[in-house]
Image: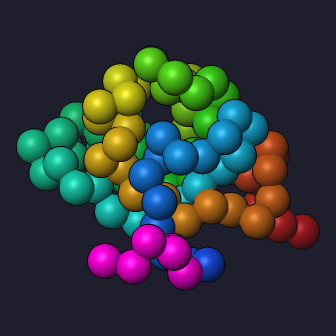
Amino acid sequence: MNSIARKNDPIPLTDLPAKACGIVTHVRNKEELERLQAMGVCLGRRLEVVKTGDPLVVRVFGSRIGLSSRLAEHIQVNPCPVAPRCWEKPA
């Protein structure tokens, strides 16, 4: 595996810094997928990292959700080009 990621390669949610946002591209832990979807963490959804660490806190549709770093590591995202108000649609 190449250690240099391409620009558009997904990264683990835990790699995003606070106030950055990402669009969910994949969830590697299929056992947790249904629970994450119930919390609003779905494929194509924009998440903003509110707080890094354990728990990692994300904003989804204006709600804050705490995720263990173990679980957040399984969520793959493409970083958004604009932050921190990434949940708003561009004009």
Q: Is most of the magenta stretch helix, strand or loop? A: loop
Q: Describe residue 76's horizontal placement relative to residue 23 as left or right.
A: left
Q: Nearer the viewer, residue 78 or 39?
A: 78
User: How is this picture coloured?
Assistant: rainbow
Residue 77, image x, y percentages: 48, 59
Position of the N terminus, as image quadrant, is: bottom left
Residue 89, image x, y percentages: 76, 61
Residue 10, image x, y percentages: 46, 67
Question: From which residue to which does the magenta span run?
Answer: 1-6
Q: Residue furthest right?
A: 91
Task: Using the image, determine if residue 75 lies above or below residue 43.
Answer: above
Q: Describe residue 24's horizontal placement relative to residue 49 as left or right.
A: left
In this orientation, does residue 32 appear? yes
- Residue at 76 percent across and 65 percent down: it is 81
Residue 51 inside the magenta-drawn segment: no
In this orientation, does residue 44 appear? no
- Residue at 41 percent across and 66 percent down: it is 25
Q: Nearer the viewer, residue 90 or 20?
A: 20
Q: How many marks?
A: 0
Q: Describe residue 68's horizontal placement relative to residue 23 as left or right.
A: left
Q: Describe residue 76's horizontal placement relative to residue 19 as left or right.
A: left
Residue 91, image x, y percentages: 89, 68
Q: Quarter-wise, where is residue 51 in the image?
A: top right
Residue 5 inside the magenta-drawn segment: yes
Task: Using the image, determine if residue 21 lies above or below residue 58.
Answer: below
- Residue at 51 percent across and 75 percent down: it is 4
Q: Quarter-wise, where is residue 84 in the image?
A: top right
Q: Residue furthest left?
A: 31
